[in-house]
Image (spheres, rainbow, N blue to C red):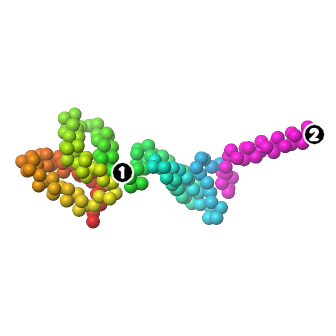
């Protein structure tokens, strides 16, 4: 009876070890999120984006998949995954940009923030960057030039224009 129990425990340990390490068809150990499809032998990396949706990255070989994983991790650390998802607003892009601008003088930075908050944040800033067309930016630009307070402040106008250009990911029609 002791032999059968010992034999049974070895089988359980072997099954447990097999469950802990997944391998591809060539016997290489796969990391968390990695798998290999048997149908076409392509490698797949599965992850959840910041919005909570399941995403997939495919590659023909494991080395390429891991390079794509590394780039994906780097982009996520840089906050770029939200751009790919198309959910980034102009405000998000501007705030990200300004957080990286450490070489500006404090007065220049505060002036940029003031102008952006005053003229862009509550209007064009709330829109998704992927949805903005070139004509939208031109129309917004023309609207700002027609305002009375901007007619006499040409420097203000140039600052607003540079704020729009900083977020210049607008698509041309």
Residue 24 on the magenta span:
yes
Q: Which residue in the structure is indicated by mark 2? A: 1
Q: Secondary structure at mark 1?
A: loop
- Work out whether residue 142 can be spotted: yes
Q: Is residue 23 left or right of residue 55?
A: right
Q: Is residue 64 left or right of residue 124?
A: right
- State which quarter of the image contains the C terminus: bottom left
Q: Which of the numbered marks, if any, corresponds to residue 88?
A: 1
Q: Secondary structure at mark 2?
A: loop
Callout 2 crowding tier (Cα within 10 Å): few <14, some 14–19, many ≥20? few
Q: Position of residue 170 (x, y in %)?
A: 28, 57
- State which quarter of the image contains the N terminus: top right
How would you classify the magenta stretch by its main secondary structure? Answer: helix
First in residue order: circle 1 vs circle 2: 2
Q: Residue at x 21, y 37 (%)?
A: 110
**Residue lying furthest front:** 122
Q: Is residue 9 left or right of residue 154?
A: right
- Residue stretch rendered in magenta on the structure: 1-28
């Amino acid at each position: 009876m002791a032999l059968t129990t010992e034999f049974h425990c070895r089988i359980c340990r072997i099954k447990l070890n097999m469950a802990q390490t997944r391998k591809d068809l060539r016997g290489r150990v796969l990391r968390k999120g990695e798998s290999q499809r048997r149908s076409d032998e392509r490698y797949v990396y599965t992850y959840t984006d910041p919005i909570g949706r399941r995403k997939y990255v495919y590659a023909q070989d494991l080395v390429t998949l891991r390079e794509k994983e590394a780039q994906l991790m780097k982009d996520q650390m840089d906050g770029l995954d939200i751009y790919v998802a198309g959910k980034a607003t102009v405000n998000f892009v501007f705030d990200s940009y300004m957080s990286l601008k450490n070489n500006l003088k404090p007065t220049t930075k505060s002036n940029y923030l003031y102008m952006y908050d005053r003229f862009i944040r509550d209007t064009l800033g709330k829109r998704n960057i992927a949805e903005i067309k070139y004509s939208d930016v031109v129309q917004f630009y023309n609207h700002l030039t027609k305002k009375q307070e901007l007619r006499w402040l040409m420097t203000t106008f140039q600052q607003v224009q540079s704020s729009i250009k900083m977020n210049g990911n607008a698509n041309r029609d």
